[in-house]
Image (tube, rainbow, N blue to C red):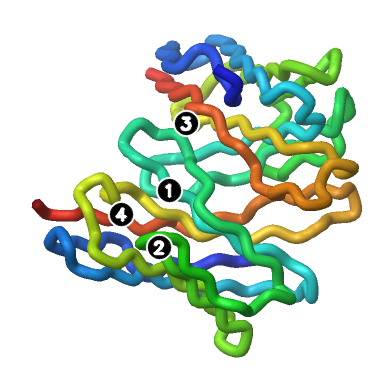
Amino acid sequence: AQKVTQAQTEISVVEKEDVTLDCVYETRDTTYYLFWYKQPPSGELVFLIRRNSFDEQNEISGRYSWNFQKSTSSFNFTITASQVVDSAVYFCALSFISNFGNEKLTFGTGTRLTIIP
Amino acid sequence: DTGVSQDPRHKITKRGQNVTFRCDPISEHNRLYWYRQTLGQGPEFLTYFQNEAQLEKSRLLSDRFSAERPKGSFSTLEIQRTEQGDSAMYLCASRVPEVKLAGADHEQFFGPGTRLTVL
């Protein structure tokens, strides 16, 4: 069984501060994928990043960066110099290739991030 | 607009009524997913189509739920005899075919969802 845990339910930071969202996962599969999605107040899930289990190289994209550590089963997400537009619910998700070729996603419960102006 | 679209965006119904939602995936996306998201939770997988074939269903999908994708394009999700516990956001997502995965992102593109309220 797969499980994704986002222990932080809500985080509030003042604009321009850095913030890290934690994600811990459980899976028995050797090949799996990790994702981060953003859900703004409009409700639509927006894809941010995908990582496969063989690629532990951390990534930076603009103000976003991701830290994937297989040894601790963590896939954390950091926003530097936060902005009000970053306010949203952020979901970490895990998927694997099922027998049906179905890459269904298992989501965490999300972290609501509020950036205070 | 070439994204995933869903209709209606909001639906309010009385307990016991039937409701049907529609999802139009991104053109050429042969894989289509339905998820359900309740308040304060992450989306949960309901069912998956590859073209017109429904290949996997979650145990969350009770007998009152049925999903179709008759021509491998749009999909419908019907809930019969709705219950208050069915109140949720129903999300649809689509993804590129396997043959196009090389060099392409593997993410599922989500629609805006249909918010169902059962009174």
Q: Could you tell me which chain the residue with mark 2 belongs to?
A: A
Where residue A96 appears, as percent x and y from the top left, is: 75, 60
Marks 4 and 2: which is nearer the front? 2
Identify the residue under disc 4.
Answer: A112
How would you rate the neighbour count of disc 4 (Cα within 10 Å): few for under 14, some for 14-19, many for 20 or more? many
Where residue B79 appears, as percent x and y from the top left, is: 62, 20
- What is the distance, in whole Å, between disc 1 and disc 2 at their CAs? 12 Å
Marks 1 and 4: which is nearer the front? 1
- What is the distance, in whole Å, between disc 3 and disc 2 at their CAs? 28 Å
Name the mark on residue A38: 1
Query: Which residue in the rendered view is the most extreme toward the front?
Result: A62
- What is the distance, in whole Å, between disc 1 and disc 3 at their CAs? 16 Å
Q: Is residue B43 left or right of residue A70?
A: left
Query: Are the residues under badges 1 and 3 in a single subunit?
Result: no
How would you rate the neighbour count of disc 2 (Cα within 10 Å): few for under 14, some for 14-19, many for 20 or more? some
Q: Amino acid at mark 4?
A: Arg
Name the mark on residue B89: 3
- What is the distance, in whole Å, between disc 1 and disc 4 at their CAs? 10 Å
Task: Check contact, mark 3 vs mark 2: CB within 8 A.
Answer: no
- What is the distance, in whole Å, between disc 3 and disc 4 at their CAs? 17 Å
